Image: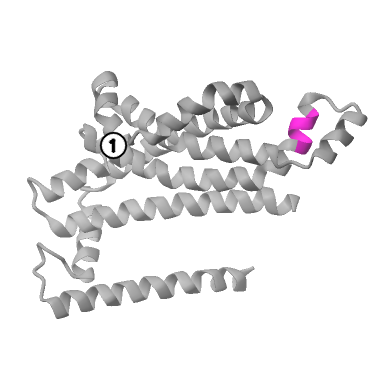
Amino acid sequence: MTRRVLRDLLPVVAVATGFVVAWKLLVVIGGYPTFILPPPEVVASRLVAAWRDGTIEPHVATTLTEILLGFLIGSGLALVTGYALARSRLAERLLSPYLVAAQATPILALAPLIALWFGTGLASKVIICSLIVFFPIAVATMVGVRSVDRQLLEVGRVYRATPLQVLTRLEIPGALPLIFGGIRVGATLAVIGAIIGEWAGGESGLGVLINLARGSLFDTPLLFATLLTIAALGVALYWLILLVEHQLVGERG
């Protein structure tokens, strides 16, 4: 187990190290000032200082709350909708055009309207996160349920399995790999949704901190430190989903 973890982490560490080295070389060769492109050690120092003095912690808590609530609500609605679309051609014909139209509308354009309608508090951020994660999970659920082996479903009917038994013992296990593919995409999109919502209006959050760092504070190292924190949140959520997927799909496989 330990060897496998080390084997999986080694390429990640190698790429991260190469990125930092390339970043440092770019700063040195280009001679960029700190307010344009700060070197990695300055950003790391500013990140540590921001955590120590309490600058970044409340913003992380706000953004993480928005991400988790939006992801849970959006994915829950998407799972139900995706299953309905997979099992009902009528539902697919009625809902698909509107779902596609909603997905085609840039969330960046909708965010100011949502903030206007629901205020600049938590509700608007959760709605934006829910909207942005909904479509990929709904589509993945629909495709996953439809990909379940029809022969297995027929066997279930022959043995008079109840609809609940068909759902829990045949459809969900068979669709899980594809569903988790959509969930992984949705988890990373939830981070983007939270930041967009905070840009549209808010008093706290990493998106707000970005605006402060590049605006009134004019603190480019803090801006980079905030971006690294956002990236770390996205990676952590993605790995968490992978861990859950491994436990569920791996055991079934």
Residue for point 55% across, 21% down:
94
Residue for point 68% across, 27% down:
87
| Magenta-drawn stretch, dominant element (helix, strand or loop) | helix
**Closer to us: 234 or 177:** 177
Label 1 element class: helix
- Name the image colouring: one colour
In the picture shown, does residue 241 fall above or below 84?
below
Q: Along the horizontal axis of the image, is 21 left or right of 233?
A: left
Q: Which quarter of the rendered picture does the N terminus lie within?
A: bottom right
In the picture shown, does residue 81 fall above or below 242?
above
**Closer to us: 223 or 42:** 223
Q: Along the horizontal axis of the image, is 207 left or right of 144?
A: left
Amino acid tagged 1: Leu
* Picture quadrant of residue 166: top right
Residue for point 78% across, 25% down:
163
**Closer to us: 31 or 38:** 31
User: Where residue 202 appears, x then y in whole percent?
Assistant: 22, 32
User: Where residue 13 appears, x then y in whole percent?
Assistant: 43, 72
In the picture shown, does residue 30 fall above or below 132?
below
Residue 108 painted magenta: no
User: Where residue 36 appears, x then y in whole percent?
Assistant: 11, 63
The residue wearing badge 1 is: 108
In the picture shown, does residue 230 fall above or below 66?
below
Q: Give the range drawn in magenta.
A: 165-170
* Picture quadrant of residue 179: top right
Residue for point 22% across, 79% down:
25
Mark 1 residue crowding within 10 angstroms, few (<14) / some (14–19) / many (20+): some
User: Where residue 181 appears, x then y in whole percent?
Assistant: 56, 48
Tally the numbered discs: 1
